[in-house]
């Protein structure tokens, strides 16, 4: 599909955390739907390879989203190459080290907050100042987790960041809505990525279970008895980024097979 057609025709998107997992899948889908995409991640070799696989309408670059200069350079690259930013996907995240709260360290807690929460503010601030506010249009999508709804043992750092992202989303939506800009929060549950599977194998070993038996227990917690694939997250991100969602802002929308039902 050319950039002249598709649900994101003529749009420019930035996707952080774009080297592995959902990032490259979202980038590929966005390009297929007409967007030009800047893919950013800390692991330069991986993100460059992912962008190359997608084609000329995807550009990969190294960016540490906790570093203000790196974030500014990322947005500058989008502006230089494509002249605007229409969509900001704050997808970069890190799980941190699993620790009981009585073991928690300031370093682990703050490092997770920096990547999973503060970075979303930095990236949003930069795209607003460089493109969206002046043009009076744009979409920001933050990526939380159902762990931020329910809590999760040994993850005070991660759940705190992911819960705060929902409040950040509401506040941004209130501030930028009158300027024609939307902000929503996509809230996945489990996503069957390499990172999730490695974590699952570790949890299974701790519980004395096989990975398949552990996974079956996890599936019992969702009405659809399914675990999301990266394309499921990409499809929801595409909808929220598109004009089809023009009346949706300030919302946290789950994509978790019904594992956590809001309301």
Image (cartoon, rainbow, N blue to C red):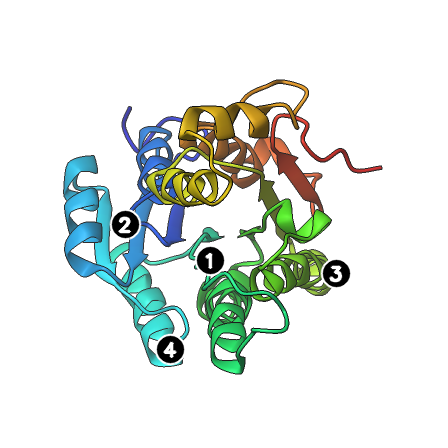
Neighbour tally class for label 4: few under 14, some 14-19, many 20 plus, Cα within 10 Å: few
Q: Say which residue label 4 marks.
A: 67
Query: Could you tell me if the residues under marks 2 and 4 are in contact, i.e. CB atoms within 8 Å?
Result: no
**In this image, 150 relative to 65: left or right?**
right
Can you tell which of label 3 and label 4 is closer to the viewer? 4
Q: Residue furthest top?
A: 224
As helix, strand or loop, the secondary structure at mark 2 comes to: loop
Q: Residue furthest front?
A: 208
- Marks 2 and 4, the one that precedes in the sequence: 2
- Marks 3 and 4, the one that precedes in the sequence: 4
Residue 174 image label? 3
As helix, strand or loop, the secondary structure at mark 3 comes to: helix
Viewer-proximal residue among 242 and 156: 156
**In this image, 242 relative to 179: left or right?**
left
Q: Say which residue label 1 marks.
A: 95
Quarter of the figure that contains the C terminus: top right
Instruction: From this view, report whether residue 98 is shown above or below residue 215.
Output: below
Query: Which residue is at a point 63% across and 73% down the rendered structure image?
Result: 102
Residue at mark 3 to residue at mark 4: CA–CA distance: 26 Å
- Marks 4 and 1, the one that precedes in the sequence: 4
Q: Say which residue label 2 marks.
A: 19
């Amino acid at each position: 599909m050319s950039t002249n057609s598709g649900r994101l025709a003529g749009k420019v998107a930035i996707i952080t955390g774009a080297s592995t997992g959902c990032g490259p899948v979202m980038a590929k889908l966005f390009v297929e739907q007409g967007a030009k995409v800047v893919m950013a991640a800390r692991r330069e070799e991986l993100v460059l390879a992912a962008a190359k696989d997608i084609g000329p309408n995807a550009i990969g670059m190294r960016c540490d989203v906790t570093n203000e200069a790196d974030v500014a350079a990322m947005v500058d690259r989008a502006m230089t190459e494509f002249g605007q930013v229409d969509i900001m996907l704050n997808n970069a995240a890190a799980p941190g080290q699993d620790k009981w709260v009585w073991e928690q360290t300031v370093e682990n807690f703050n490092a997770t907050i920096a990547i999973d929460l503060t970075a979303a503010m930095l990236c949003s601030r930069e795209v607003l100042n460089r493109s969206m506010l002046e043009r009076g249009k744009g979409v920001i999508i933050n990526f939380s987790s159902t762990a931020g709804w329910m809590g999760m043992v040994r993850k005070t750092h991660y759940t705190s960041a992911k819960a705060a992202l929902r409040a950040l989303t509401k506040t941004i939506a209130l501030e930028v809505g009158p300027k024609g800009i939307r902000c929503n929060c996509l809230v996945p549950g489990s996503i069957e990525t390499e990172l999730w599977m490695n974590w699952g194998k570790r949890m299974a070993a701790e519980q004395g279970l096989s990975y398949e038996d552990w996974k079956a227990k996890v599936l019992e917690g969702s009405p659809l008895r399914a675990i999301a694939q990266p394309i499921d997250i990409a499809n929801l991100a595409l909808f929220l980024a598109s004009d089809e969602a023009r009346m949706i802002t300030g919302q946290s929308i789950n994509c978790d097979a019904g594992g956590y039902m809001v309301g």
